[in-house]
Image (tube, grey):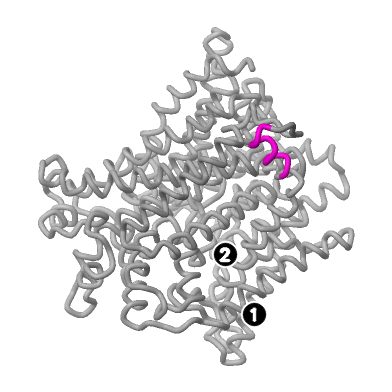
Amino acid sequence: MENRPRLWRGFLLGMILLPLNTLWVFYLESIGGDGPYVSTISLFFNVIFIMVFVALANAAVRRASPALALNRGELIIVYVMLTISTSIMSHDMLQVLIPIMTTGYWFATPQNHWDQMLDATTPGWLLISDQDILYGYWNGATTLYQSRVLEAWLSPVLWWIGFVFVLVFVLICLSVVFRPVWSDRERLTFPIIQLPLELTNPRTSLLRNPLMWIGFGIAGLVDLINGLNYIYPSVPSIPLYLDLGAAIHNDPWTGIGWLPVTFNPSVVGLAFLMPLDLLFSCTFFFFYRKGMFVVAKATGLSEGYGWGVSEAIFPYSNEQMFGGFIAIALGSAIIGRQYFRQVWLRILGRPSEVDDSREGLSFRAALLGSIVGVGMLVAFAVHTGMAPAMAIAFFAIYFLLAVAVARVRAEFGSPVHDFHFAGPDRTLAVVLGTMNIRQHDLGMFQQFYWFNRAYRSHPVASTIEGLQMSARGGSSGRAMSAAILLAVLATAVTGFWAWLHYAYKEGAASAWGYGADWFGGEACARVQSWVGDPKAANFAAAIAMVVGFGISLLLAAARTRFVGFPLHPVAYALSASWSIHLVWMPMLIAWLVKLLVLRYGGLRFYRRVLPFFLGLIIGESIVGCSWSLIGLIFNVPSYNFFGF
């Protein structure tokens, strides 16, 4: 309760830092072109960087004048506003949306017919089709601040800002309902918030712990040396990446495909927070899926490793992953059915065992907000020409997957959860067949690609963990919900402005890397293949989804029936993710170290060494992100300590 009266200072500091953070993410992942791609990892390194210095500054203020220091509730609000800022401006949201708005008409040719395709499938008020407006955008040497240019952008930008605001609001409503049962009844640990909770605790001893500074020094030294090597190649480097797949030349083993081995210290530190069985399971299923690619190559059913952006290919990893995540979402609802009965009683105003007075919204408001919010999103889709049934199916699948991602965050704390190319757009196209879907619906699948291409920085992570941090820190859930929504609006406005200002000044075609047109071209090429070469329903892919769903349920049943069963259903679904390639080795290292720590030192020893692993995260965040700031200040390429 003591945190509530002064929360306005958290809002104020958050609003001061948020535009700077948004611009920084824009620079890191778009303008700079070399990363680090901070939004592709579960714990955003840029936010940790900022919060470490906020915590140090707050500690200095506390020593000089305790009354002026921020309390925990205020610091938590700052942290969550920065995470939602990173999520919205990320490599999987605005950085995909704006290219989709600008690529199709500009890169249309007599061969690809993208302009004709967009005319037939997509409402013009969501895109920029005027060639004069696009010329300035792609070639630069002009300015955004012309009445004709501003008028052309105003309508689509406002539509999309309103859309993302409603989308995140529904995610808050879902988080309000699911968070208490996962936290208070199932006792899930929300591993990723352990470090942020320490940094937002004004009385934390973490930054004074010698083990933390040892971990900091090791991770920081690695990035210091590699950063110097990037500038001065004569300086020896410490290799952190090796592709074993490139050394395999004989069939069918070439079906393994990409097999990188990475050694990022921060990912080892983050993985050390995860449950032991989940670490083992994720590594096990990663190699199980690699084996399936070899089988596919050996049998001639496919060429092995591949993702099938537009079409499903054997062994249908994306489809199995989709089925697994649906099982996770539905399983969460089934496990908590007794709790949800009490929630329903609370909504009806009857005596109930649950209390929503400290939640982000009342349960009644969350239910009504979900209904109204989803209704608005469906109405938006229908207004664009999408069939009502298709729009309902699309958003039903999206929010089911959002619940699954939230569950992964709450239980697993995985460093990655990208879920590439398995969202509702691709799933509906594969299961129903593109020949059975209206062209307008396929066109809107393209427009919705920006928040469904991958879920690495899914905003549900900020909503569920923000509310959990608020509850753990004794702060106001209502204030947290308001802070998230305020951050969404501020980030969307800042993000659109920054991108367009820079594009019209420097030219999107030459100002930064592939991000300016890659995602838009990818989306256009996909819908072009759907419209130009329609396919029947893929029954094999649909069966694979059912198989993935069934295997996840069987694994969950085995864990219930057999004590100590080592394989976890969440890991089965997550192991098919693209980004798991970048973290499987750090997860294996963390599993081995954590196993030894718990077996020979017990829980007490684990708690004693934990600051060392948190130090690995902090050290790489500080030194690694500092290189990007050097690159920004001196306008030179900088060392990328975490790729995508």
59 to 91, vertically: above or below: above
Secondary structure, magenta segment, majority class: helix
Q: Which residue position holds label 1? A: 292
Res 258 quadrant in image = bottom right
What's the amino acid at mark 1?
A: Met
Res 515 quadrant in image = bottom left
Image coordinates for residue 463, horizontal then vertical, percent: 54, 40
The segment highlighted magenta reads 341-349
Viewer-side residue, 39 vs 266 = 39
- Label 2 environment density (alpha carbons within 10 Å; few <14, some 14–19, many ≥20): many
What's the amino acid at mark 2?
A: Ser
| Residue 620 appearing in the image | no
* Of callouts 1 and 2, the N-terminal one: 1
Viewer-side residue, 169 vs 211 = 169
Image quadrant where one finds the N terminus: top right
542 to 234, vertically: above or below: below
Viewed as shown, does residue 125 lie left or right of 629?
A: left
Residue found at x 61% / y 90%: 298
Viewer-side residue, 31 vs 457 = 457
Viewed as shown, does residue 233 lie left or right of 577?
A: left
Image coordinates for residue 270, horizontal then vertical, percent: 64, 47
| Residue 56 appearing in the image | yes
Residue found at x 36% / y 64%: 446
Q: Which residue position holds label 2? A: 577
Between the residue at mark 1 and the residue at mark 2, the CA separation in whole angstroms equals 14 Å
Image coordinates for residue 340, horizontal then vertical, percent: 70, 45
Q: Is residue 343 magenta?
A: yes
- Label 1 environment density (alpha carbons within 10 Å; few <14, some 14–19, many ≥20): some
Tell me the element at label 2: loop
